[in-house]
Amino acid sequence: MTNKPFGVSIPLDAKVHPEIARIAIEERVPIVHTSVGDPRAYTQRSKAAGMKVLHTAFCVRHALVAEAAGVDAVIASGVDGGGMLSSMGLTTMALVPQVVDAVKIPVIAGGGIADARGIAACFALGAEGVVMGTRFMATQECPVHPRVKEAIVKAKDTDTAVVGRAAAGISLRALKSPFVETALELMQTMDKEKMANFLHGGGQIYRGLIEGDMENNPALCGLSCGLISDIPEAAQVIERLVEEFAKVVMGMPKSL
Ligand SMILES: Cc1cc2nc3c(=O)[nH]c(=O)nc-3n(C[C@H](O)[C@H](O)[C@H](O)COP(=O)(O)O)c2cc1C
């Protein structure tokens, strides 16, 4: 499909993660990214195969464990982001500089970044790179359903909610919907395992995002949806970010 370098994400809570990791390591994919689990799982094997390893940390302790496991860089991911979040509630603004202070390896910031201002802010916090998920969902190439892309464009700052925080151990940030309303109610009483099953135990994320049934499934989306107002090509997003980043940085001294 491409002769350009690419990475593979390995969510360590997914049942198929050993299979994903086996193929990624066999094929010597240049970069692997692990999350929601023990960073020791595949780090040494991947590094022995000459690959770079990134791991997502939701708190300083996660970052220190990942650094000790030998990962090349850590992604400090705040609850501002879309998708799976930790139940600890650390925001990008608070988490990134604390991780930067704690580890010696490069830190990549994630959660709530959708434009050049967010990138500049994260660089000011000490990050050396950023991860952007929600912004790239609303692009032509992204395989999510057009209904989801349109909903992101329409969404304003208050249109997402975090479900699962109390009961599930892991939380999801998704666009508000009847499904999310039900999940918020069930969170009060449902036990951890049932809640996790209710949220993503059997294809719900696929049905919400790819099939576009957002009423009955979670449509994962971050807080930055309020900053997104179009569905360009991914390359246009990158071009804009590069162009705007220079303007943001040049404009900084004037606004001090
Ligand atoms: C639809 C969607 C799916 C995601 N899936 C994963 C995943 O499988 N593994 C993971 O570590 N992070 C996942 N994330 C989180 C992203 O890697 C990233 O940390 C997050 O999107 C950054 O925040 P932002 O959405 O505000 O840009 C997902 C995010 C979204 C929006």
Image: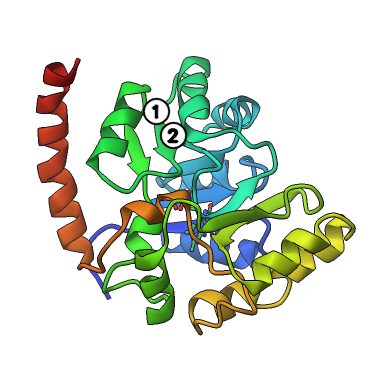
Is label 1 in contact with label 2 (beta carbons under 8 Å)? yes
The image quarter containing residue 2 is bottom left
- SS of the residue under disc 1: loop
Mark with earlier residue (1, 2):
2
For the question of whether residue 65 can be seen, the reply is: yes
Check disc 2 and report the residue beneath it: 73
Mark 1 and mark 2: Cα distance apart in space:
5 Å
- SS of the residue under disc 2: strand
Quadrant housing the N terminus: bottom left
Q: Is residue 136 above or below residue 113?
A: below
Asked whether 60 or 140 is in front, the reply is 140
Q: Position of residue 11 (x, y in %)?
A: 59, 57
Q: Relative to residue 24, is residue 138 drawn left or right?
A: left
Quadrant housing the C terminus: top left
Check disc 1 and report the residue beneath it: 106
Q: Position of residue 255 (x, y in %)?
A: 17, 20
Q: Is label 1's Cβ within 8 Å of ligand 1?
A: no
Q: Position of residue 179 (x, y in %)?
A: 67, 72
Which residue corresponds to the image point at 14% horizontal and 42% vertical from the top-left? 244
Q: Position of residue 213 (x, y in %)?
A: 55, 83
| Label number found at residue 198 | none
Q: Is residue 47 above or below residue 199?
A: above
Which residue corresponds to the image point at 76% horizontal and 48% vertical from the top-left? 169
Q: Is residue 155 above or below residue 67?
A: below
Which residue corresponds to the image point at 41% horizontal and 47% vertical from the top-left? 51
Callout 2 crowding tier (Cα within 10 Å): few <14, some 14–19, many ≥20: many
Q: Name the amino acid, label 1.
A: Pro
Q: Relative to residue 137, is residue 187 drawn left or right?
A: right
Q: Name the amino acid, label 2.
A: Ala
